[in-house]
Amino acid sequence: MSLTASPAPAPRISYGAVLGSPYVARLLGGTLTGRLPNGMAPVAILLLTTASGSSIAFGGLLSALYGLSSALSQPVKGRLMDRHGQSAVHLPAALLNSALLVALPLAGPYGGPGLATAIVVVGGLTTPPLEAGLRALWPSVLPDPRLRHAALALDAGTQGLLYIVGPLLSAALASAYNPAVALAVTAALGLAGTAAVALAPPSRRCDPNRSWGRTRPRLGSWPPLPCCCCSFPSPASDSRSEP
């Protein structure tokens, strides 16, 4: 029978401790706010299209094109962040995306379906890659692996809220006012959230020279994410660094 006492278990990490760390609440809150357009814009686009007299099929097509173009452009925007830094990509993307969403209600009277389609596609292409940028920042913001794992869990757990709150908010604004107002609020939220993240010191300090392009991650470490201005350690390396 061993007389050696087992080591005391490490104290549990609370979400309060994570949110109390410098810049965490700002980065997480800004990312969630800046990504609300991902859930709001497709609904607002559909409602705007049907309200202007077009078919629901065309509205659904525009909504799908917005989401598809946003997804397809993520690797390109990640590469741009690797080269130029997060703030240099987030802010121009958010400005252009917001401007296009606000301009979309004018496409029907002045440009017809062709212009509306072009605006929606370019708007999707210019959605800021906030989630990938946030996950790339965690190692520099939270050097403690246990805090970082708790932050990732909190981050992942709140992402579903975007697709619950976003469509409900968009539908409520369109019902209370009109779809153009819903798009304007969508644009304002996206711009405000992105600015909060892009102007935060961790985003501005992110070094473009430390990219995955120079240090290729091991397969199976983390799910492939576009953008990593800051190195992104694997769970295996985190576990080795824990006491």
Image (tube, rainbow, N blue to C red):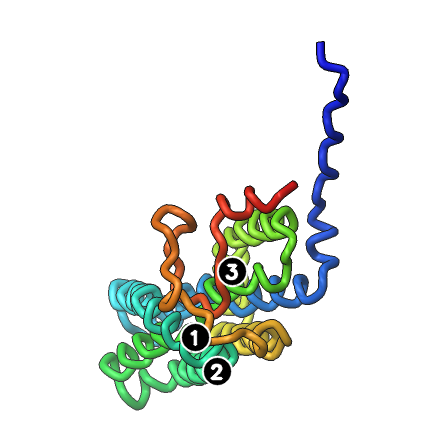
Q: CA distance from mark 2 to mark 1?
A: 7 Å
In the displayed structure, 29 sits above or below 110; it is: above
Dividing the picture into quadrants, the one containing residue 58 is bottom left
Dividing the picture into quadrants, the one containing residue 93 is bottom left
**What residue lies at 63% left-to-right and 63% top-to-bottom?**
141
Label 3 sits on what residue type? Arg
In the image, residue 18 lies at what x, y percent?
Answer: 69, 53
Helix, strand or loop at label 3? It is helix
Q: Nearer the viewer, residue 30 or 217?
A: 217
In the displayed structure, 237 sits above or below 117; it is: above
- Left or right: 145, with 97 as reference point: right
Residue linked to disc 3 = 135
**What residue lies at 56% left-to-right and 54% top-to-bottom?**
155
Label 1 sits on what residue type? Met
Helix, strand or loop at label 2? It is helix
Residue linked to disc 1 = 81
The mark that comes first in sequence, 1 or 3, is 1
Helix, strand or loop at label 1? It is helix
> Callout 2 environment at 10 Å: few (<14), some (14 to 19), or many (20+)?
some
Q: Looking at the rendered structure, which numbered label has been put on residue 88? A: 2
* Quarter of the rendering occupied by the C terminus: top right
Q: CA distance from mark 3 to mark 2?
A: 17 Å
Q: Nearer the viewer, residue 170 or 242?
A: 242
Q: Nearer the viewer, residue 32 or 120?
A: 32
The mark that comes first in sequence, 3 or 2, is 2
Label 2 sits on what residue type? Ala
| Contact, mark 2 vs mark 1 (Cβ under 8 Å) | yes
